[in-house]
């Protein structure tokens, strides 16, 4: 004889509305400090853009005018008359894109080797690699210049790019992230007959996309803004000058602060590509920072 078990439905508990948490004085002070730092960091960029829209009279006015009365793009058009803007931007793009692409590839491969292979003196070699990160760039400037001269790459974009095809920081970053990729995943790919190159670029690389995005941003911004090394190698070859060096002509052209808006317009154009790249890679960059913090 079957017995029916009657269950009484329990009344659903009403969720109590959460009270908004009040900020403690310490938390409020921290938030105000962060806000002050953010405003102070963004102020030079905002001032640069606003000044590029002012007339020459407004740029010289004392006390300074914060907002232009009639924003004008005349300064942007005048920049092209002083420097070869298109050619300089193209040179910077070639240098930044080629070096960044090479750094991503070499860092992935070397980082994979340091993270997943065991060989003699691996840790000692990695320690030497890390030690090179502490060398000031000026220390290696003359040896690199001699090497580039021996290869016959002086006064060319190739001479700027070739010494920067690999990066110790990139290898270190990739090694740290690739160590978190499960060994079982790599072993399964090997059992399926995948080559090591295929494992690196089709198995490991998708697993460390946030690190690749962060390294892409760091490398692109660094080599886009590089000044001393291109100036040393190019040796007056103005046709190969990147935008950062070409902007120095605007400073000499700015006599008596009459063309401050011209200088600011050129600087605004120069920072646009790195800013746009950061906007595109912002989500991956934040993910990489969070992941590195979780890994400790």
Image (cartoon, rainbow, N blue to C red):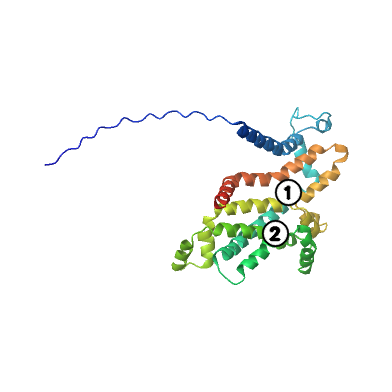
1 vs 2, front mark: 2
Viewer-proximal residue, 64 or 10?
Answer: 10
Please name the residue shown 62% across and 70% down the image.
Answer: 121
- Give the answer, above or below, for where 118 lies relative to 275: below
Image quadrant assignment for residue 58: top right
Q: Which residue is mark 2?
A: 133
Question: Which residue of the protein is positioned furthest toward the bottom in this rendering?
Answer: 120
Q: Which residue is mark 1?
A: 86
Q: Earlier in the sequence, mark 1 or mark 2?
A: 1
Q: Does the CB distance between marks 1 and 2 fall below 8 Å?
A: no
Question: Which residue of the protein is positioned furthest toward the left in this rendering?
Answer: 1
Answer few, some or many: residues within 10 Å of disc 1's Cα (few below 14, many 20 plus, some between 14 and 19). Answer: few
Where disc 2 sits, the SS reads: helix
Viewer-proximal residue, 296 or 168?
Answer: 296
Where disc 1 sits, the SS reads: helix
Estimate the x, y position of residue 277 in percent, counting from the top left: 63, 47
Res 165 visible: no
Please name the residue shown 62% across and 54% down the image.
Answer: 215
Number of marks: 2
Estimate the x, y position of residue 246 in percent, counting from the top left: 79, 49
Answer few, some or many: residues within 10 Å of disc 2's Cα (few below 14, many 20 plus, some between 14 and 19). Answer: few
Please name the residue shown 79% across and 41% down the image.
Answer: 263
């Amino acid at each position: 004889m079957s017995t029916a078990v009657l269950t009484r439905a329990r009344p659903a508990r009403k969720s109590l509305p959460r009270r908004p948490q009040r900020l403690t004085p310490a938390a409020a002070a921290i938030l105000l400090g962060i806000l002050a730092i953010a405003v102070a960091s963004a102020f030079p960029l905002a001032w640069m853009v606003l000044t590029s829209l002012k007339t020459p009279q407004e740029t010289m006015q004392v006390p300074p005018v914060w907002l232009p009365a009639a924003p004008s793009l005349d300064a942007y058009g005048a920049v092209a008359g002083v420097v070869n803007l298109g050619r300089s931007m193209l040179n910077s793009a070639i240098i930044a894109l080629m070096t960044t692409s090479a750094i991503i590839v070499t860092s992935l491969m070397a980082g994979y080797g340091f993270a997943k292979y065991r060989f003699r003196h691996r840790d000692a070699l990695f320690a030497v690699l890390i030690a090179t990160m502490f060398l000031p760039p000026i220390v290696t400037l003359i040896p690199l210049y001699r090497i580039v001269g021996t290869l016959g790459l002086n006064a060319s974009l190739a001479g700027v790019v070739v010494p920067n095809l690999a990066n110790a920081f990139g290898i270190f970053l990739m090694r740290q992230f690739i160590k978190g990729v499960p060994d079982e995943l790599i072993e399964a790919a090997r059992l399926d007959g995948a080559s090591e190159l295929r494992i690196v670029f089709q198995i490991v690389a998708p697993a460390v996309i946030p690190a690749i995005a962060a390294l892409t941003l760091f490398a692109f911004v660094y080599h886009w803004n590089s000044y001393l090394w291109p100036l040393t190698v190019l040796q007056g070859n103005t046709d190969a000058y990147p935008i950062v060096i070409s902007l120095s002509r605007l400073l000499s052209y700015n006599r008596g602060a009459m063309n401050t808006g011209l200088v600011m317009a050129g600087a605004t154009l120069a920072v646009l590509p790195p800013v746009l790249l950061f906007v595109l890679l912002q989500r991956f960059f934040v993910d990489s920072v969070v992941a590195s913090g979780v890994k400790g």
